[in-house]
């Protein structure tokens, strides 16, 4: 590789075309700044990176979309400058939490205990959902906090401080933990209503405890499958309940006639 500017090197793609890479060394750490279509662009990225690392007056608010450095790299460099730790992901550490940035105004706030997890996994966005690649699979990050894919904010979970970008554990309250179960107030008492969707919602019943409601949903799933309903229902997993206790509750729990007598057309 031929060096044309400080920190800039030529490289070749498999098809033989030439591109340029930029990198620098700061505090004895070699940092790659990315690939560029011209030596001049790579050099501008090198100069800007040096300025970000050497000038504490630069902040995320100074980022512009025409910057020679990507926003992710901008965040990584500022975090390394201020906190002495370099991450390939766009993380900026605070004393008791950290930010994971997408844009200067779009970010998540995470607990420090999640730092190792997100420092090695890039969050991708698609259709309002956020995923990480985990052991070859795309995992919705909300599931890490007990929020199911189909959960509705305000009904199944809520953010205590009202900020849906704040994913610290203390800020997330799970209202409905189980599939098909919805907590309702009935004559001043909290009860648990169960519905299951076929072509529309079918009422399964209302129960005194969340556990009864979760088992009722499972029973409804089994009855509908026996009736010929071909849907990929996800049954509730009853953590901490023994098989014998589950069997007793399952056999005694009552479900609506709409479920018991359902027939596929």
Image: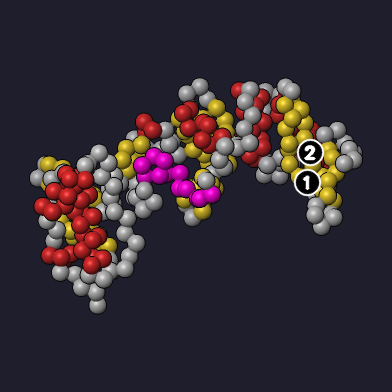
Give the side of residue 130 with respect to residue 92, left or right. Answer: left
Q: Position of residue 114 (x, y in %)?
A: 48, 32
Circles 1 and 2: CB atoms closer than 8 Å? yes
Q: Quadrant of residue 66?
A: top right
Q: Residue furthest bottom?
A: 265
| Disc number placed over residue 36 in the picture, else none | 1
- Few, some or many residues within 10 Å of mark 1 (<14, 14–19, 20+): many
Q: Quadrant of residue 170?
A: top left
- Residue pictured at 83% horizontal, 46% vertical: 11
Q: Position of residue 134 (x, y in %)?
A: 51, 45
Q: Nearer the viewer, residue 188 or 229?
A: 229
- Residue pictured at 90% horizontal, 40% vertical: 2
Dot 1 falls on a residue whose secondary structure is strand
Which residues make up the magenta segment?
A: 136-147
Residue under pointer 2: 22
- Residue pictured at 23% horizontal, 67% vertical: 226
Cα distance between the residues tagged 1 and 2 = 8 Å
- Few, some or many residues within 10 Å of mark 2 (<14, 14–19, 20+): many
Give the side of residue 151 with respect to residue 89, left or right. Answer: left
Q: Is residue 105 above or below residue 232?
A: above
Q: Is residue 190 magenta?
A: no
Give the side of residue 183 with respect to residue 15, left or right. Answer: left
Colour treatment of the image: secondary structure
Q: Position of residue 242 (x, y in %)?
A: 21, 42
- Quarter of the picture containing the N terminus is top right
């Amino acid at each position: 590789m031929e060096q044309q500017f400080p920190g800039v090197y030529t490289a070749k793609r498999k098809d033989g075309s030439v591109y340029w890479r930029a990198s620098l060394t700061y505090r004895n750490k070699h940092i790659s700044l990315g690939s560029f279509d011209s030596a001049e662009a790579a050099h501008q990225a090198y100069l800007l990176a040096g300025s970000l690392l050497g000038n504490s007056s630069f902040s995320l608010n100074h980022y512009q979309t025409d910057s020679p450095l990507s926003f992710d790299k901008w965040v990584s460099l500022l975090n390394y400058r201020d906190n002495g730790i370099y991450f390939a992901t766009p993380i900026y550490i605070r004393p008791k939490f950290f930010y994971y940035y997408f844009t200067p105004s779009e970010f998540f706030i995470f607990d420090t205990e999640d730092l190792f997890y997100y420092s090695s996994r890039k969050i991708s966005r698609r259709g309002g959902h956020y995923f990480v690649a985990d052991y070859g699979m795309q995992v919705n990050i909300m599931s890490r906090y007990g929020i199911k894919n189909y959960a509705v904010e305000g009904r199944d979970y809520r953010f205590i401080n009202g900020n849906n970008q704040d994913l610290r554990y203390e800020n997330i309250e799970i209202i409905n933990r189980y599939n098909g179960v919805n907590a309702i107030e009935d004559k001043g008492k909290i009860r648990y209503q169960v519905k299951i969707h076929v072509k529309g919602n079918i009422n399964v019943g209302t129960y005194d405890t969340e556990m009864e409601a979760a088992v009722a949903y499972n029973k409804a799933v089994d009855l509908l499958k026996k009736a010929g309903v071909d849907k990929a229902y996800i049954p509730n997993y009853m953590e901490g309940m023994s098989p014998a206790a589950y069997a007793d509750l399952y056999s005694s729990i009552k479900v609506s006639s709409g479920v018991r007598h359902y027939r596929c057309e």
